[in-house]
Image: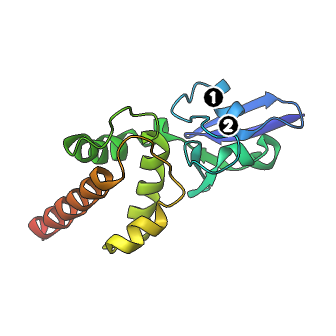
Amino acid sequence: MLITITLNGKKVTDDVAADTLLIDFVRGHGCLSVKRGCETANCGLCTVFMDEKPVLSCSVLAARASGHNITTLEGLQGEAAEFGAFIADQGAEQCGFCNPGFMMNAIALFREKQDPTDEEIKEYLAGNLCRCSGYEGQLRGIRAYLDWKKQREEDAQ
């Protein structure tokens, strides 16, 4: 089956089997930030944006994504580097395996909510599993990043 997906801003056409998952398609095209963690759509490691909304690529057929824009962490390097520094500063990355999916969902949160409460942050990121950190470092990193962004915007005015 021939499909065309705009992957990180570039049109990609490929012949795939009908049962090919989006995670396998994007990884096959060099987007190795997208991780396979659970095979049951429970961990969030495979999060990508489909038309700017976060989806679990392990539960979407590549054929369903045909004609859509798919963005992985590789396509968000500016935002990812900016936010990632705050996560690293809090020691929240530890093994780092969950970071790409976590960062994708956090970036989606930042785009949707300018000043989320801690409860909103926890609720929004509830689908991301981290076996190392207990989430406190991530929460501190998110808070520090949001405070920094707010201060930067105030300084610009």
Give coordinates of residue 61: x percent, y percent. 79, 44
Query: Dot 2: what SS?
Result: helix
How many other residues sit within 10 Å of disc 2, few (<14), some (14-19) or many (≥20)? many
Q: Name the residue under label 1.
A: 27
Q: Which amino acid does label 1 sit on?
A: Arg
Real-space Cα distance between discs 1 and 2? 6 Å
Residue 27 seen by the camera = yes
Q: In this view, does 128 lie above or below 147?
A: above
Residue at position x 45%, y 45% in the image: 130
Q: Position of residue 37 (x, y in %)?
A: 60, 37
Position above or below: 11 against 137:
above
**Apparent side of residue 81 relative to residue 39 in the rendered image (left or right):** left
Relative placement, left or right, of 93 versus 33 is left
Badge 2 amino acid: Ile
Tell me: residue 17, above or below residue 56: above
- The one of 138 and 72 positioned closer to us in this rendering: 138
Nearest the viewer among 24 and 45 is: 45
Q: Is residue 16 left or right of residue 111?
A: right
Query: Which residue carries the number 2 mark?
Result: 23
- Which of 89 and 27 lies nearest the eye of the viewer? 89
Which quarter of the figure is the N terminus placed in? Answer: top right
**Residue 114 seen in the figure:** no
Q: Estimate the x, y position of residue 15 in percent, counting from the top left.
A: 84, 28
What residue do we see at 39% from left, 67% from top?
121
At mark 1, the secondary structure is helix
Q: In which quarter of the image is the C terminus?
A: bottom left
Q: Do the residues labelled 1 and 2 touch (CB within 8 Å)?
A: yes
